[in-house]
Amino acid sequence: MPRSLSVSLPERVPGGGFSLDPDMLKLVLERARPLGHREDKNTANLGFGFIYYGLVRALRPSHVVVVGSGYGFSVVCLALGLRDNGAGRLSFVDPSYSLLADGPFRTVGGTAQWSDPSKVRAHFDAFGVGDIVTHYRMTSEAFFADYAARELPPIDVGFIDGNHSYQAVRHDFLAMLARARRNSYLLLHDTNIYVRELVRHAGVKRWLKAVAQRPDDFEVLDFPFDSGVAMVRIVKDGPWQAVEP
């Protein structure tokens, strides 16, 4: 595991404008390779990617945290929104597991994309967001355990797409919740993978149902298309009621 680094988050980053021209759409679809985001390459349609980008443009977050990504699709869409806002940073957490090397209980579809720091930087540089994205090659448990030591600010937008087991999703949600505040948004990908939920190989939908049982604390909007994605708005500042099934 690499040594933890303290990351300073400047108020402004280079950028401004609108990134999603036809060339960028093609680049994102080809190189960030969305998996289950209701995308359509034939029509240059980013699917849920437009939601990720639009949410950042509308909310203007200072700090976005993404846990897990196969080829960086959610990271890129969110980071492009930050770039076009001209402000904000993104912390990307992924241990770079491989399905072949680490097995299906640690990752589903993982291809160890994030093992070489120079290649990771080059990947995000291709989209013009290399200076916005900081990759942490570690588990989310390790990342959040040292969150304060890294002097990272509160989470304005979080995206959960790492280990899909019920306990892992629960951990990532609660870890983000503890570092978020009222009107922060937490997104959960893969809310619509019913076969894996049925055989208990995933627990995203089950956890989302637990969260929805706390309407005084959270508002939930689920998009049950393709692999599905849900947005959870934190209604009030903590402390929150215990979130359990």
Image (cartoon, grey):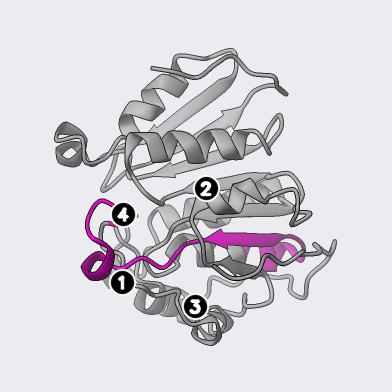
Front residue (pair 69, 25): 69
Q: Secondary structure at mark 4?
A: loop
> Dot 4 corresponds to which residue?
106
Residue annotated with mark 2:
141
| Residue at x 51%, y 14% (from the top left corner) | 214
Quadrant of the rendered structure where residue 196 is?
top left
Does 144 sit left or right of 213 as displayed?
Answer: right
Q: CA distance from mark 1 to mark 2?
A: 20 Å
Q: Which residues are magenta?
A: 81-107
Residue type highlighted by circle 2: Glu
The CA distance from mark 4 to mark 2 is: 13 Å
Residue at the disc numbered 3:
24
Q: Residues within 10 Å of mark 2 (few under 14, many from 20)?
A: some
Q: Nearer the viewer, mark 3 or mark 1?
A: 1
Label 3 or label 1, whichever comes before in sequence order: 3
Q: Residue at x 41, y 72 (%)?
A: 32
Residue 66 vertical position relative to residue 118 in the rendered view, above or below: above
